[in-house]
Image (tube, rainbow, N blue to C red):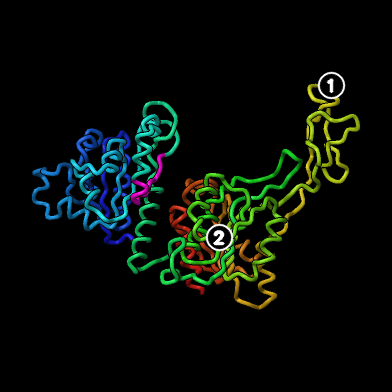
Amino acid sequence: MWEGKLIVVGITGSIAAYKAVDLVRRLVERGARVRVLMTAAAERFISPVTLRELSRAPVVTDLFAPETAGDVITHVQLGLEAAAFVVAPASADMIGKMANGLADDPVSTTYLVTRAPVIIAPAMNSNMYTHPAVQANIARLRSLGCIFVGPEEGRLASGHRGPGRFSETEKILAAVEQALREREERRGGPAGGAPVGGTAAVAPWAGRKVLVTAGGTREPLDPVRFIGNRSSGKMGLAVAAEALRRGAQVTVVMGTVDEAVKERFLAAARAASPAVVEVERAQEMLRVVMDSGLDQDVVVMAAAVADFRPKTYSVEKIKRVRSGSGTGGGVSGGDGAGSGHGVDGGDPGRQETLVVELVPNPDILATLGRAKVERGMPKPILVGFAAESGDLVSRAREKLARKPGLDLLVANDVRQPGSGFGSDTNAVTVLYPDGRVEPWPLMTKDEVARKLCDLIQDRF
């Protein structure tokens, strides 16, 4: 995907300019040819020498700079030959120039020349970012096809909190990679996945039915409380989005997911119209999966399903202070009483402890796998996920052995940096039924989804 591609990076005058160093380094590591353009304001924050050494090429800092006079590739040629043009960080001034067709520096001039995908990562004070003039310029650039990454909410250089933080390098890399893929698909080159709503000519999964579970489950204890987990749904929805890009007919069984993640997925997938079935409890997810799972070509069980649920459910909120009968609202085994004692030496009405009896939830992956084996058919291709917290390979092997009909198991250690719930990245290990173990390096969840779909596609 990256090897030999010319990625032009434009750096503008922002306190976040130093973060572009990591972006350039990571692009070079991926095999891209990188050329850097800088505005005069950018030079006040970071030296071109650093970027020249990292990119292994001259840095263009002035349209008429003598140090680049002997460079056979001018800024115009860079714009014409670029596979992608990344403006990171993009200041409010640069966004205004680009939106209004002004060109008086290497970055803004190259923007007008290039016909490559343009990825913009803004970074500025939150008041500047939210100003109607800046928002109008961003809207104008979006309408022209520019791709925006961020900015993020958080603490800014001024000490205030708000939108304006430069996005993480991984997010920018993911946007660039997706833009490169879609550009190749439009040109009829190697696809590796079709854009959402793409044609069958670039949709290797056209006609395939795919079911993906995503998010966590909630097992209610009473009308207020539940047992749940920290799953954001990012990994499962990344797989669903990749299957859609490849042209599949996708059903998403969606547990509890981060609302922002859900909204982004639904907005991006609107043209492809995936079927979305929302559930809350493990038993609800089981019913949906078993109703249609065996009719699918692929089932990816990426949801974090609760292993246990409360044995009984209290129809009323369980109170800290016991009622006169001493009942706790129908929990704690079969008698409904929360066992407890007085607190602070003498309040017999206050419960010191609450005992909740849990019972196992159905194993959805194993249940579907057994049904697949009993039917004696190779479909669906069945992929499971395992979130562990130590002894990753040995525990994943045990899980693989317990799951009949499983074709792939994707395991990750949630304690490892960048691999936990809610992160945008993941470092997974793929286990095969024949005993092979394949660790993958830390990458974005979108990249994990693409590699995983490549493995699935090999089994078609």
From the viewer's side, name the closer residue of 418 and 92: 92
Q: Position of residue 216 (x, y in %)?
A: 62, 50
Q: Secondary structure at mark 1?
A: loop
Q: Is residue 26 visible?
A: yes
From the viewer's side, name the closer residue of 368 and 94: 94
From the viewer's side, name the closer residue of 162 and 319: 162
Q: Which residues are magenta?
A: 141-151
203 magenta-colored: no
Q: Earlier in the sequence, mark 1 or mark 2?
A: 2
150 magenta-colored: yes
Query: Could you tell me which quadrant the N terminus lies in?
Result: bottom left
Which class describes the residues within 10 Å of circle 2: few (<14), some (14-19), or many (20+)? some
Q: Which label belongs to residue 335?
A: none
How many marks the image carries: the answer is 2
Q: Position of residue 136 (x, y in %)?
A: 36, 39
Q: Position of residue 330 (x, y in %)?
A: 84, 41
Alpha-carbon span between mark 1 and mark 2? 59 Å
Q: Is residue 358 left or right of residue 285?
A: right
Q: Nearer the viewer, mark 1 or mark 2?
A: 2
Q: Is residue 25 left or right of residue 313?
A: left
Q: Residue drawn 43% across and 31% down? A: 155
| Residue identified by numbered label 1 | 346
Amino acid type at mark 2: Pro
| Residue identified by numbered label 2 | 274
Q: Residue drawn 46% across and 60% down? A: 196
Q: Secondary structure at mark 2?
A: loop
From the viewer's side, name the closer residue of 355 and 202: 202
Amino acid type at mark 1: Gly
Q: Position of residue 236 (x, y in %)?
A: 55, 56
Q: Is residue 25 left or right of residue 292?
A: left
